[in-house]
Image (cartoon, rainbow, N blue to C red):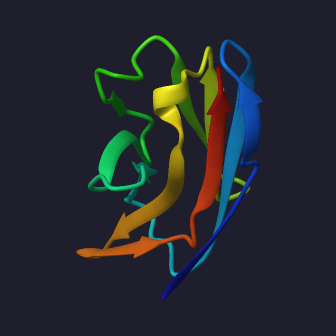
Amino acid sequence: QVQLVESGGGLVQAGGSLRLSCAASGSLGSINTMGWYRQAPGKQRELVTTITSSGSTNYADSVKGRFTISRDNAKNTVYLQMNNPKPEDTAVYYCYHHVYGRTYWGQGTQVTVSS
């Protein structure tokens, strides 16, 4: 089992910055993938970004150049640095951890970007 606890969400002005954190605990495995999805009201959950245990990253086109994912393997924590957020980035952000063929989810954290 894996437990994920997100923090750092809130209200931010467009053009500002915000950092989300996700602390993982449990059977994390040495080879895994972590990342963030988001879900806006009335929309499907969509992938934002991923990072493997070796540090390879992937981003949705909509956030490239603005968001940065990183991880601290010693702390079992993944971060999402959101720079220059836009109102369309408003959503509930979910951290996930994929290992041993299973995907685990955090409880979600609300990010609201005001114009």
State the quadrant of the C terminus: top right
- The residue lying at 38 percent from left, 59 percent from top is 32
Going by the image, does 72 lie left or right of 91? right
| 67 and 62: which is toward the camera | 62
Seen in the picture, residue 51 relative to 66 is either above or below; the reply is: below
State how many labels appear: 0
**Residue 41 at x, y percent in the picture:** 41, 54
Going by the image, does 102 lie left or right of 66? left
Quadrant in the picture for residue 100: bottom left
**Residue 105 at x, y percent in the picture:** 46, 71
Seen in the picture, residue 73 relative to 30 is either above or below; the reply is: above
Q: Is residue 78 visible?
A: no
Quadrant in the picture for residue 99: bottom left
Seen in the picture, residue 45 relative to 113 is either above or below; the reply is: below
- The residue lying at 51 percent from left, 47 percent from top is 91
Q: Is residue 51 visible?
A: yes
**Residue 79 at x, y percent in the picture:** 63, 42
| 14 and 18: which is toward the camera | 14
- The residue lying at 50 percent from left, 72 percent from top is 28
- The residue lying at 59 percent from left, 22 percent from top is 85
Seen in the picture, residue 76 relative to 21 is either above or below; the reply is: below
| 32 and 64: which is toward the camera | 64
Quadrant in the picture for residue 76: bottom right
Q: Extreme bottom residue here?
A: 1
**Residue 49 at x, y percent in the picture:** 39, 38
